[in-house]
Amino acid sequence: MSNVLVVGGAGYIGSHACLALREAGHEVVVYDNFSTGHREAVLGGVLIDGDVRDSEKLKEALRNYRVSVVMHFAALISVEESVSNPIAYYEANVEGTLSLLSAMVDVGVEVMVFSSTAAVYGKPDYSPMLEDHPTRPLNAYGESKLAIERAFPHYERAYGLRISKLRYFNASGADPEGRLGEAHYPETHLIPRAFNAVLGGPPLEIFGENYSTPDGTCLRDFVHVTDLADAHVRVLRRLQDGGDSDVYNVGTGSAYSVREVIQMVEKVTGQEVPTIISPRRIGDPSSLLAASDRIQNELGWTPAHSNLQEIVESAWRWHQTGWHVGATGDTG
Ligand code: UFG
C-alpha cells in the first residue's frame, strides 16, 4: 500500500476519495488550502494546509511523507463562474497543476491520478460519448482542464511520469454512511439547490426549457460520488501495477433531464420543489452522457450506487444532517 498525497482532499470528491483510499489500506496525506474545502471533511490521515501553487511546500510534503502517488482534485469547478472569471480558472487549474507537476518531477514522484471533466467535450457529436470524442469545450472551466490534459503527454515523455485522467460526468450524492457530502458556498449544483428550494430558500431556477431534448431541459449523467471514489482507487491500482497513462470517462450511460431530477427530489423529500423558468446558463451543453465501457471493462468498475433514487436519497440525508448544517448559517 502507498502513501498518497491527495491535493484538494478536503473538497467534495477528494474527501470521498480519501475515505475509499483509507478503506483500501492506503496512507493519506491531505493537502488543501481550504479556499473551497472544509476541515470537517478530513476524517483521518495527515493534513497539510497549503496552496497547490506553492511548489516548495508541495515538495516538502512529498519528501517528508515519502509519497509515491499523487491524486489531484484541487480545482475551481463552476462552469458559470469560469465564463465570467477565466483568470481564476486558468490560475487555479492550469498554473496550479503545473506547479504540482514541477514538484513531482523535482522529487521524483512519477504517478498521478487527475480529476478531469466531461466539460472537455463540449457539444456532443454523438451520445453516449467515448473518450476519443472530439474535445471542444464550451467554457473556460472545460478549456482549463483540457489545456492541462494536453500538457501531460509532454511531461510523461520527458520525465517518465504516468498520469491517468478521470473525466467525471455529474458528481452527486453523498457517502452512504452519512460521514461526508457536498458543501459548496455558494451552491451551484442542481440537486442541492433543489433541496434548498424545498427547505424554504429561493425557488429553483430551471436554466432553459427550450433545449432540443425530450422535455426541453438539459440532460445529464449523474454518477454517485462513492462510485467516483472507487474509480480512483481502481485507477491507482492499475498505475501501481505498472499500467500506462490512460483516460477514462466516469458516468453511468443513463441520462436524466433537469425536470426528471426535480421529480425525484419531490419523491424523496415528499415535498414540491418550487421552480421558476430562467434563461439558459451560458456554457451549458444540452446533453452530457458518458460511455464508460473502458473503465468498466478494463478495471471492473461499476456504477453500483448511481441510480438516481439512491443518489438523491443519500444527498438528502446528508443535506439535513451533515456537519455542514448550521456551520455557516445555511445548508448550501
Ligand atoms: N441547473 C438548473 N438550475 C440550477 C442548477 C443547475 O437548471 O439551479 C441545470 C443546469 O443548467 C444543468 C444541470 O442542471 O443543465 C446540471 O447543472 P449542475 O450545475 O448541477 O452541473 P453541471 O452539469 O453544470 O456541471 C457539472 C460539474 C462540472 C462539470 C459538468 C460537466 O459541476 O464540473 O458537470 O460534467 F464540468
Image (cartoon, helix red, strand yellow):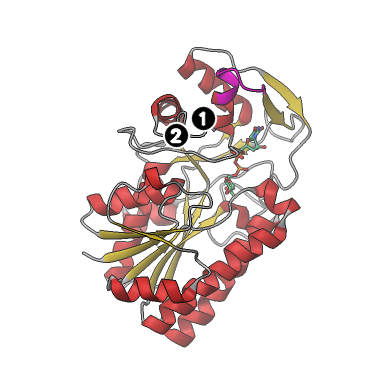
| Labelled disc at residue 324 | 2
Magenta: predominant secondary structure element?
Answer: loop
Which residue sits at x=69%, y=46%?
80
Task: Name the residue carrying label 1.
Answer: 331
Which kind of residue does numbered mark 2 sit on? His
Which residue sits at x=77%, y=31%?
210
- Location of residue 292 in the rendering, given as x and y in whole percent from the top left corner: 46, 51
**Observer-nearest of 13 and 138:** 13
Q: In the rendered view, would you say 30 is above or below 181?
A: below
Quarter of the image where one finds residue 275: top right
- Location of residue 300 in the rendering, given as x and y in whole percent from the top left corner: 31, 52
Please state if 325 lies on the left or on the right of 285 as rendered: left
- Is residue 135 among the parts visible in the rendering? no
Quarter of the image where one finds residue 8: bottom left
Residue 287 lies in the magenta-colored region: no
Which quadrant of the figure shows ligand 1? top right
Crowd rating for badge 2 (residues with CA inside 10 Å; few <14, some 14–19, many 20+)? many
Asked which secondary structure carries label 2, the reply is: loop
Give the residues in magenta. Answer: 196-203
Crowd rating for badge 1 (residues with CA inside 10 Å; few <14, some 14–19, many 20+)? many
Which residue sits at x=54%, y=31%?
192
Q: In the rendered view, would you say 24 is above or below 98?
A: above
Q: In the rendered view, would you say 280 is above or below 148?
A: above
- Location of residue 167 in the rendering, given as x and y in whole percent from the top left corner: 51, 55
